[in-house]
Image (cartoon, rainbow, N blue to C red):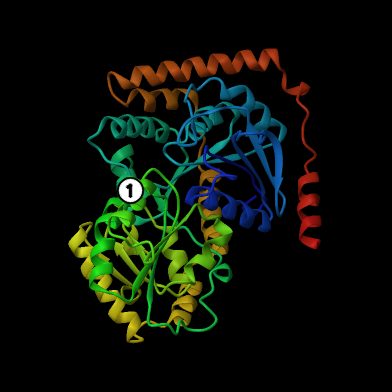
Amino acid sequence: MANSPLSIAMISDFFHPNVGGVENHIYMLSVNLLRRGHKVIVITHSYPPDRVGVRWLLPGLKVYYIPFTTLVSSATLPDFLTFLPYFRNIILRERITLIHAHASLSALGHEGILHAHLLGVRTVFTDHSLFGFADAASILTNKLLEATMRTVGATICVSHTGRENTVLRANLAPEDVYVIPNSLIADQFLPAATPLTSDTVTIVVVSRLAYRKGVDLLVAAAPRICAACPNVRFVVGGDGPKLIDLLQMREKYFLQDRIELLGPVLHRDVPKVLTRGAIFLNTSLTEAFGTAILEAACAGLYIVSTRVGGVPEILPEDMISFALPTEDDIFRAIVEAIDIVQHGKHDPHRAHERIRGFYDWKQVAVRTEKVYRAVMDSPPQNLWTRIERTMGLGPFVGPIFTIILAVDCLFFMCLEYWYPREDIDYVDKQWGKHRFEEVLET
């Protein structure tokens, strides 16, 4: 039926308790799909010291933490077969009809799409990042993504720039890729109740302190900005390998009273940090969307950002100043932004109301549901079609992934024999729904 509830499994290596754009996207999308009457579970890997097994997150989201250890950057080692017994058991016992995998670097996501067709489950994939084409890591990742996309039902990207990037990397038809942006809860990011009356202009940076986030540009530009603008101070929140560079820069230029380093900031504390400032600075070298920028704009800050990736798609031109990813241009854009905020050309409360009208998780859930319906209404792929598409990867890669596909099918047949479906402890269809309704009532 067109409006019948779906049973959806979100699969990714990146989920809570980690904090990040992908993690928040999966959680908020899942919650809003639950509110629309669908069944949603999350499948991810375990987290030390004891986050393993089944957990529940408010307001009734069931999470399976599979006992896998991570390899690097919260991602597990892709081995294709180890995940299948867990995946088969969960999908069958929860009566899942569609899986939604997230992130190109998620091994669990790729494996979930590979295994899904064995159980007659439809698939959707969301790409959250931008990748290059020249370095070895990007080449391998792109080929894996292309192999996965050969059998996926639909692909979603969080920006039009991300869509172009994914289309090129995975060799997809542009018309087969949807664009659905990230969003936020506007009520969590309110501007300061009273205007900042001090002559001091505070520039806020909240970011993972890594090379990709352009922290080297911040290290180079901050001393120049402090020297040219005596009334400017920085508040920097975040952690990462580049924190030591910021500490050394602050010591070198004696800016301990002008640059405050907060260290790691919990997501619930981000609004408090944002309302301390008037300008938000983003120096990223690559960015598919930029949720931190959206949150800062919603909190009433004027934005200065490098013009990279999908950032130009996020905000109207009068709410943001762009800079090239160079020290000189970031300095120019900051000086321009200081003039804007000091002369009252930016209204924080009007900016908040505009963001509230632009972005809403309810609309993201509605648009994603339409993609789900289109996938469910499309004809299924049989094994021969999957083999043909996989062989189309090329004379070298095609046979390798076809062998993986064949071994996967044989292993699945063994599991069907060793652990028959009638022996699986199936979940009560209504139990999770009742739990969700009880939580809402309380």
Across and down, in percent, residue 118 comes to 56, 26
Please tell me how many numbered marks the rendered image carries: 1
Task: Give the residue displayed 38% in from the left and 78% down from the top.
Answer: 200
In the picture as drawn, the residue positioned furthest to the left comes out as 328
Q: Is residue 287 at least partly visible in the picture?
A: no
Under circle 1, the secondary element is: helix
Label 1, on which residue?
A: 245
For label 1, count other residues whose C-alpha is less than 10 Å away and answer few (under 14), some (14-19) or many (20+).
some
Across and down, in percent, residue 10 comes to 58, 42
Q: Is residue 421 above or below residue 305?
A: above
Specify the quadrant of the image occupied by residue 116. top right
Across and down, in percent, residue 125 comes to 47, 42
Task: Give the residue displayed 34% in from the left and 83% down from the top.
Answer: 342
364 vs 382, nearest the viewer: 364
Q: Is residue 94 above or below residue 17?
A: above
Name the residue type under label 1. Answer: Asp
Task: Give the residue displayed 58% in from the left and 23% down from the top.
Answer: 84
Q: Quadrant of the C terminus?
A: bottom right
Specify the quadrant of the image occupied by residue 93. top right
Q: Is residue 51 at least partly visible in the picture?
A: yes
231 vs 436, nearest the viewer: 231
Across and down, in percent, residue 214 comes to 30, 52
Specify the quadrant of the image occupied by residue 46. top right
Task: Give the residue displayed 28% in from the left and 80% down from the top.
Answer: 339
